[in-house]
Image: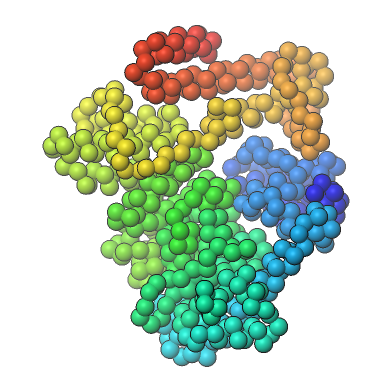
Amino acid sequence: MQDAKDEIKARLPVEDVVGQYIELKRAGRNWKGRSPWGVDKTPSFMVSPDKGIWHDFSANKGGDIFTFVMEVEGISFREAMEKLAAQAGVELTKYDGGDKKVAEKKARAREALELATKFYQVCLTRNKQVMEYVFRKRGMNKETVKEFRIGYSPSGKSALKDFLLKKGFKQEDLETAGLLNQYGGDMFRGRMMVPFFEPSTGDIIGYTARILADGEPKYLNTSDTILFNKGRFIFGLRQAKEAIRRSGYVVIVEGNMDVISSHQAGVKEAVATSGTAMTENHLKILARLTDDIRLAYDGDAAGVKATERAIELAGGIGISLSVISGYNGAKDPDELIQKSPKAWKECVEQREPAIDWILKKYESQCDLETGPGKKKYSDEAMKIIRMIPDAVEQRHYEQKVARRLDVSVEDLRAKKIPKSGVKTRLKPIKTDGKTVSETAKIKSLEDQLQAILLYGGGAGNGIKLELPEDETRLAELELIFEEKFGAMPETELKKVAVEINQRYEQERKQVKINELTKQLEECSDDEEKTEEILREITRLRKNVV
């Protein structure tokens, strides 16, 4: 695939690719702009046409056109490759030796789904009863129906199948696309059809379908196919991406209809996980677009469980969540929007940290005037608090719960939490023992040191770091050096290098101390091991300024 990458890079200048997303201005040989992640106050995003790379100094990200599209679109490398290959007019099958039959099956399935969507749209316009449901009962306007390509599947056993077969498709094509049931008839019958859009290309990859007459299931979704994977798919992301980039936040609602209603009401940042529980992949995709992720779940028991799960997953990838609640008596965003779109917009702004929200829910379920009530509350509270990856934030909530129960933080930490409740607990993702947030800080210092070591001449003496060999990475480090240190005389650069190196070592030692502190909690019953860890923490603290 390296040949394909090189060909795509040769055809697509980095400034042209990046310029599709952010405004760039010439700055000498380079181009400069504002971070697409909205974290800089002044332009700190650099693009080097000569080197074919970019670097965002405020967000500490960088790379080539592939990494940029992956980051800004929230997609995988393969998806970025396919997107850029299409722009460049590069045939990937000529390079990767991939299975052409699989590529042909995918292409045929996409064609079938596109034509099926048009068929459903026409069927909608020809059925007055369905139009009454869509436009009056559901409250959709023409622009929304057009944007989301809403349609209707006839109630006959094989209306769509017969139509597509006449158009030259084979039954195998329809099976691959997920359009047929186990008996070979139409999968969707007598339902309002809402297509699933592939976020980066806009291709139709499946459907969610709401039954209009009596019957079950109320909603029927496309099963996993060669094109659709429910563990990664986020409903509404295709339509929401631009709004998310502009506003800097995303709203996760429970239902697909909540998404559609929210977009129509003007809150276009809304998305949903489309009939499946949230996964780590869902959060990772959204976290690439923004770190302000707001949950708009119901406040019932299921909503609390879903929030617990989301907090657990978010802790694993080093992000924080907030919760939108209090729908003015409505049961969900869709119902609130039908009453007052303005009230929904106000709710979106009036969010609170997810931990605070869930602690209030636990408190409302327990009688804190009794011993058993305090025990139950502290059990649930400590389970959720221990999912928080940041030590300072964790301490904050421990102190808050301790004050509410009139006990010490030490009392809370001494609790043996029962295994009931959240059954799975993911540990924070680590790189060499560091959490994601710690890694980001250390990586920034490491980038600067490597840049000085490579391009700073004698100023790099005393820096002990391995150097990369990848050409894109070397070019990125050169850009970092030019931007941060290029104008410094060597004498000043030497002093700066020493200071950065000292901070780098201190940060690494602090990470080690944090790791050892967490180990103390896990081996509290082993006195010998506890003493050993305490001695190591003491030794390290003597060297941390």
Closest to the observer: 366 or 55? 366
Left or right of 350? Residue 146 is right
> Which of the 4 quarters of the picture holds residue 173?
bottom right
Q: Is residue 37 above or below residue 375?
A: below
- The colour scheme used to paint the residues is rainbow
Left or right of 453? Residue 437 is left
- At horizontal 32% and vertical 37% (from top left) the residue drawn is 419
* Residue 184 appears in the rendering: yes
Residue sticking out furthest to the left: 370
Closest to the observer: 28 or 356? 356
x, y percentage for residue 156? 49, 87
x, y percentage for residue 440? 59, 33
> Which of the 4 quarters of the picture holds residue 327?
bottom left
Label total for image:
0
* Residue 145 appears in the rendering: no
x, y percentage for residue 83? 72, 58
- At horizontal 38% and vertical 33% (from top left) the residue drawn is 386
- At horizontal 48% and vertical 23% (from top left) the residue drawn is 515
Residue sticking out furthest to the front: 183
Q: Is residue 336 above or below residue 533?
A: below
Left or right of 201? Residue 417 is left
Q: Is residue 233 above or below residue 122?
A: above
Closest to the observer: 492 or 111? 111
> Which of the 4 quarters of the picture holds residue 433?
top right
- At horizontal 53% and vertical 80% (from top left) the residue drawn is 185
x, y percentage for residue 224? 55, 62
